Image: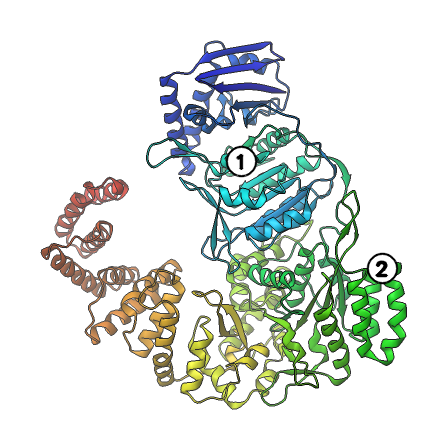
Amino acid sequence: MTTLFRIESDWLSLRCTQAGLDESRPLTAADESRFRGWLRDYHDSLRGYGDEPARLRLGRELYAWLDGDAGWLAHSRATALAPWIVDFRAPRDPDGLTRLFLQLPWELLADDRGYLAADLALRYAPVRRLGEPAQPEAPSPCRLSLVFMAAAPRDQRRLNYEAEETAILDATAKTGLDLTVEESGTLEWLAAHMAEEAPVDVLHLSCHGQGGTEPALCLETDEGATDLASVGRLIGELSTHRPRLLFLSAGNSARSVDARDGSGIVDSLALAVLREGMPAVLGWDGSVSDAEATEFAAHLYRQLSRKADLQAALAEARFALLNRIGADPLTRSRDWHLARLFLGPTGGGPLVKGDCARHRRGIEGGHKEFLDAKGQQIPVAGRLEFVGRRRLLQDALRELRQRNHAGVLIHGMARQGKSSLAARVANRLHHHGPVVVFEHYDAPAILEAFRRAVGGREVRDIIDAYRDRVRQHPDELADGLRELLEGPCRELVKDDGGRITSQPVLLVLDDLERILCDPGPGGLHRVQPEWVPVLRAVLEAFAKADSDSRLLMTSRFRFTLPQQDGRDLADALFALHLPPMETAESRQQAARKARPAGQAKAVPDEARTQRCIALAQGNPGLQDRLFSLSLQDPAACDQALTAMERYLAGQLPDQETVRAFLENLAIDHSLAVLKPGERELLRAATLFELPVPLAVLDVLAKTLALDAGEPCGIRLIGLGLWDVYPDMVRYSELAPAVNALVRPLAGTLTDGEIRALAGVALPELLAGWGGADGSRRPYPANYELARLAVRAGQPLGLEVTAEPAIRWLGDQLRYREAAQLARQAVACLDRHQIEIPLALLRVAGEACVQVGDTPTARSAYRRALARLGNLLSQGQTPDIESHAALLIAHSRLLVQDGYPNEALEFLEQTKQLLSADPRFQREHSIVLGDIARIM
């Protein structure tokens, strides 16, 4: 049942046919003042967890005002049937007062018994509509289709988008869902994906949002940097193929603000997109937690997949979030009220009415084909187990889409997850049928894989024509593949109903190290002679075919495939190195392992879990094995962890599980094929704790006159001894690092060698990472630069890198290292008679206080105060915040040393300093508290 509140021209009208209501009343200047006060109170309440009573009070005030003297809400509720949809309707171009009205948190409406949205018999849900309703688009005859894209720029806090995707799939498992995922995070590729999938019922964008006067979504560039997608860009790219519902699952995407110049209200991103013609837009009026956004989306799509009306689905999702079954009061939803649904004239109603699937493949597509092909021989992460690897997945998909190469080769250390990543690529290329070849790589086996995976008369006829020929002449496989790729596997074809009738393939040749032989002197691995014609045929076919089909290979090692004319066919492959998992990905893998599909979550020992993560060094296979042991046999796990500690310390592991795993990596064998110069460069690279630009390693190789290959270190990368990452400052450049499981066997450096090598590397590294301008340099990069400077005994860059480096160590709870770096940095700068920045002195003092080194802290503070006095005497005005922080830190140390009166003098100075600036009210209150404790 729907109740209509219409606002326009300073009047508010109510219409509720069931209750026989058709009334109106004027809006006054006093109402506008109330609206502004309520909005201010609401947004103040969002800043903390302890403001639920304030929100409930606000909900009751809103209820009382809307109910009015005539009892509008009371009369409407008397005849309401659940869900009770309240339609707040406004003109297409609302004025300022109307926009204020629409901003109000009507979701909070509450009476004496509590929130209306929590009432089972009512299940109240407000929606905001601009314009009069028109005939909506007819519901789709198929089941619900959803395009999902998460954006995770490198410089933004990481979102748990995999959990959101999994929750949506789990919630719609019984009804089915045509889900496609756009992994790029970019607006351009999203637009292409929407065109390919059109018509689309729902587009779900999960990312960070920028609110304020210039609202935008924080999407990605191709390099993974933040790309602010404004209203204009979103509409420009998506207007041709608009979804029935656009869900902007980004913080503040539905929050409007006042213009800076006082000229009025700036529409939220959601409202602005709606006004540009989107039928329905859902957003968040504030910062929402990952967990609650995920839970809400799961409930919403469960209802929509069941053919529910959009407004009713919203009501059910909000009710479910607010009334979690069996939820402890302490875990009650905090963000249930933040979702805002905006409707245009054609928005709302049911999105689907059918049950048929648009896609041939289910949600396990890609993963299933790998599992079927590999059986139990090599574990492959399924949909529910796969985590992370976002940048690598993006790189692989981008190369396969753009087709600048004949195919993609994923290579890296054993058990690093190459097959799992390939399976994920296959899953994401949902319009490509996976053809997986594993263990048997002869020409007839490849044709047979096509027959099993693709089928159809045309495919069978081509295979029958070539099967016997390729047994005798494997090179003729190129012709057979060309016929398949340019014939039945050429492109995506749909019938008039939008169903797929034929599609391209993704041919995956998995674990190719099985058919490689050791490299010759100075070269990469080679293909065994009997397999050369087959691989040549495959590469030539995909390089020349006019087809949308694609080629993907996995191998532990890079390899060469020379032609008689001197060309290396392997150069036609895009080589994608797979490094270890990041720490955040390792934690996610552990969490997934603790909750297998369809089972209750195990309760592992947290300390043991953290040891598993730390000692696995990012290797997914090793971590999976250790964590499985922790759940099945904790005692055996502890023995394995101790063995890993021994190995990482340079000793032999004494536990069978660990020893067998490490032997399978065959690190010793890879080390044995290195030239002396390569072996020495590998040892020299242990100088660094982080990946560094290849140019830095090249400088080391040239300084040491090492023959390390051309380009530098190519074999160290090809053998998996060096991992390769995007550089942390210049994303488009490569940054190698010694593999963590190789490092114990790479050799050690003496203190003298470290000092000399650090001195050589530091100038090149500092220049590559921004020099004196550290604005784009992340904290870990500052730490690496500062660490190398003190190891080299050189002050180069230390005055700009040490302070952020010490802060970062403190944030990582590495307090002793922070204090040690502080002492070393100050001493190094003093030795070279370089003036120490004020901020560095203060941070050095704070770091030393943290570990009880009060003499050093006292000295740092005194020097900082003296410097401050000199600045003030010269008429310079230091930064207020930094000035106050120094005074507070020094006063607290004085109290600790037993000098409260002296501390009081500094606190009084701080109070005066902060009281003059309203920005520092909180800090001012803290100082008053410090003063009160002394008095």
Q: Measure the C-alpha gap from mark 1 to mark 2.
A: 46 Å
Q: Is residue 805 above or below residue 15?
A: below
Residue 63 seen: yes
The quarter of the picture where the C terminus appears is top left
The quarter of the picture where the N terminus appears is top right
The residue to which callout 2 is attached is 455
Of marks 1 and 2, which one's residue comes earlier in the chain?
Answer: 1
Residue 375 seen: no
Three-letter code, disc 1: Glu
Q: Residue at the location (67% across, 78% down)? A: 569
Q: Position of residue 738 (x, y in %)?
A: 50, 76
Residue 457 image-quadrant placement = bottom right
Q: Nearer the viewer, mark 1 or mark 2?
A: 1
Residue 631 image-quadrant placement = bottom right
Q: Position of residue 773 (x, y in %)?
A: 32, 64
The one nearer the camera, 564 or 801, is 564
Assess disc 2: are there few (<14), some (14-19) or many (≥20) residues with their C-alpha within 10 Å of its C-alpha: few
Question: Image check: 667 left or right of 45?
Answer: right
Q: Is residue 422 above or below residue 287?
A: below
Assess disc 1: are there few (<14), some (14-19) or many (≥20) residues with their C-alpha within 10 Å of its C-alpha: some
Q: Residue at the location (55% across, 74% down)? A: 643
Q: Residue at the location (80% across, 46% down)? A: 495
The residue to which callout 1 is attached is 276
